[in-house]
Amino acid sequence: MSKEEEWRTAPTLSATPDPHALLLGIPEGGEQDPFHWEEEQTAAFQKLKTLLMEAPALGLPDHSNKPFQLFVHEYNQTATGVLVQTFGSWLRPVAYLSKQLDPVVCGLPPCLKAVAATAMLIAEADKLTLGQVLYTCLMVNTSEVQQRLRRVCKMRLKFFGVK
């Protein structure tokens, strides 16, 4: 497994459909019945515990000239990512980031959706990096992105970090 793919071993809590609602027995409509602890809640609690224990421990960010790296993945209308720093020969996670994509972004082609998701998480990561160097890798065809961005109106360019 490459270093770029290692962050995907992080817990998939964002892909787990509402683990808290399942644990509390809240149905899809949002109405809450009186709380009853049964087998279903025990199983949901055990699953949640297991997912949390599988995650690599987060380290404190080191702001002493160590660059940060951000790995981003867009899935199911959600931008998820992990902010890492080198720690010896390892990439240590500093933060797990997740942000719901805007409905406008969800309607874009995949290459533009990836760029917009990355721009959103860079803005979130900037709060933690305090202006330090931040690297991110985005595997899209840049000529295709530039060509498609020409057709995007100026008001929507805010989703790509373009002013």
Image (tube, helix red, strand yellow):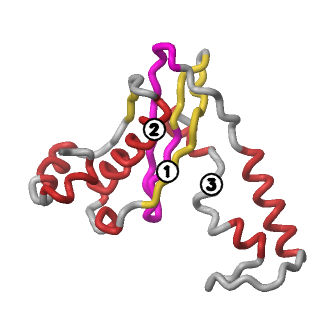
- The amino acid type found where label 2 is placed reads Ala
Which circle, 2 or 1, is nearer the viewer? 2
Give the crowd class for mark 1: few <14, some 14-19, many >=20 residues within 10 Å: many
Q: Are marks 2 and 1 in contact (CB under 8 Å)?
A: no
Look at mark 2 in the image and give the residue it sits on.
125
Q: Quadrant of residue 62?
A: top right
Predominant SS of the magenta segment = strand
Q: Are marks 2 and 3 in contact (CB under 8 Å)?
A: no
Q: Which quarter of the rendered picture does the C terminus lie within?
A: top left
Q: Position of residue 136 (x, y in %)?
A: 38, 34
Q: CA distance from mark 1 to mark 3?
A: 10 Å
> Which residue is at a point 29% across and 68% down the rendered structure image?
107
Q: Position of residue 31 (x, y in %)?
A: 68, 85
Q: CA distance from mark 2 to mark 1?
A: 12 Å
Q: Is residue 55 left or right of residue 64?
A: right
- Start-end of magenta stretch: 63-82
Disc 1 is placed on an element classified as strand
> Which residue is at a point 26% across and 62% down the rendered structure image?
109
Q: Quadrant of residue 96?
A: top right
Look at mark 3 in the image and give the residue it sits on.
12
Which disc, if any, is residue 157? Answer: none
Disc 2 is placed on an element classified as helix
Q: Nearer the viewer, residue 52 or 143?
A: 52
Q: Is residue 26 left or right of residue 93?
A: right
Disc 3 is placed on an element classified as loop
Q: Does residue 73 sit above or below 128 in this rendering? A: below
